Amino acid sequence: MLTGMSERVLDKADGPAGGDPASAAGDMVTVHQVTRTYGRGETAVHALREVSFGVPRGELVALKGRSGSGKTTLLNVVGGLDRPDSGSVRVAGTELVGLGEKELLDLRRDHIGFVFQSFGLLPVLTAAENVGVPLRLRRTERGEREDRVALLLSLVGLEDHAAQRPGELSGGQQQRVAIARALANRPSLLLADEPTGQLDAETGRSVMELLRAVVHSQSVTALVATHDPQLLAIADRVLELRDGRIVPTE
Ligand SMILES: Nc1ncnc2c1ncn2[C@@H]1O[C@H](COP(=O)(O)OP(=O)(O)OP(=O)(O)O)[C@@H](O)[C@H]1O
């Protein structure tokens, strides 16, 4: 069982790095009155309208909503990849609004792991090399890097596939590599955009269960956009976006 496996492989000492900038009891993500509009005038698209919510530390929160409801925009704003027109976004205790590009880059590198629908793996690298990319970028020493990569591949159940390239792996296995890579720098926050969107229902479910196991075993917080109804049950809580607004879920 994945939960058991991840608990065995990663102990408490393997939690988020870089200190603990937010209070233990506080939210990992706090979004307040965030608005994001693309274009202007009659053709303006209001992707986010005065969105406010918190993501409690250590929880897996699913973000649901129809196509075009603003999920990706919200993930991009929380991940510092896009800037809101107004409002406040705090991640791990840091206000993102007003940060420069270099500071946003540092925050992403130190605190945030991204998982995308399309996996985003480098096709010429092996699974192990893909997982090691963020560690190379940080100039992590080779021995430490190899140990960490082995640990992460084991966490996602791919220890026997380390030498295979993405083209030699199934979709579910590729997404597991992408999750391992997103965890390489011990992020405190995982942001995932339709991580099961390209997978069949059964594989998608197992990837989602892996995400949940990772969240619980490593004290990572996750915000996951999905419109797959059967996956929402796995989340600790569900937020719904409709036309750029958070609406109450039933
Ligand atoms: N760069 C952009 N320029 C103009 N409009 C944009 C841009 N990015 C997003 N939008 C618009 O903002 C709205 C929200 O888009 P967003 O991608 O956040 O929705 P989504 O809920 O993630 O949809 P999907 O489930 O299809 O990925 C849409 O109407 C979209 O067309």
Image (spheres, helix red, strand yellow):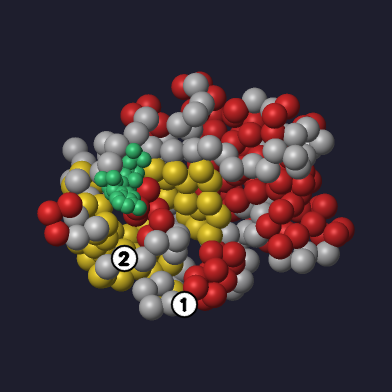
Q: Is residue 35 above or below residue 182?
A: below
Amino acid type shown at disc 2: Pro
Q: Residues within 10 Å of mark 2 (few under 14, many from 20)?
A: many
What residue appears at the point 34 percent right and 34 percent down from the top-left corner?
227
Could you tell me which secondary element the residue under label 1 belongs to?
loop
Amino acid type of the residue that numbered disc 1 sits on in the rendered structure: Gly
* Residue nearer the viewer, 4 or 116: 116
**Is 208 situated left or right of 174 in this image?**
left
Q: Around disc 1, counting alpha carbons within 10 Å, would you say few (fewer than 14), some (14 to 19), or many (20 or more)?
A: few
Image coordinates for residue 130, horizontal then vertical, percent: 71, 46
Q: Quadrant of residue 28?
A: bottom left
Q: Residue at x 53, y 51 (%)?
A: 114
At a point 44% along the width and 77% down the height, the residue shown is 99
- In the image, 202 versus 181, the foreground residue is 181
Image-based side of 122 in relation to 240, left or right: right
Q: Is residue 82 visible?
A: yes
Task: Measuring from the top left, give residue 224's x and y in whole percent.
Answer: 42, 45
Residue 193 is situated, as x and y percent measured from the top left of the image, at 44, 44
Question: Is the C-beta of the residue carrying label 2 under 8 Å from the nearest atom of ligand 1?
Answer: no
Q: Mark 2 — residue?
A: 84
92 left or right of 63 in image: right
**Disc 2 to disc 1, C-alpha distance:** 14 Å
Q: Residue 100 has which mark?
A: 1
Q: State the mark number for residue 185.
A: none
Q: Which sits in the foreground, 87 or 184?
A: 87
Q: Quadrant of residue 48?
A: bottom left
Of the two numbered discs 2 and 1 on the same chain, state the one appearing first in sequence. 2
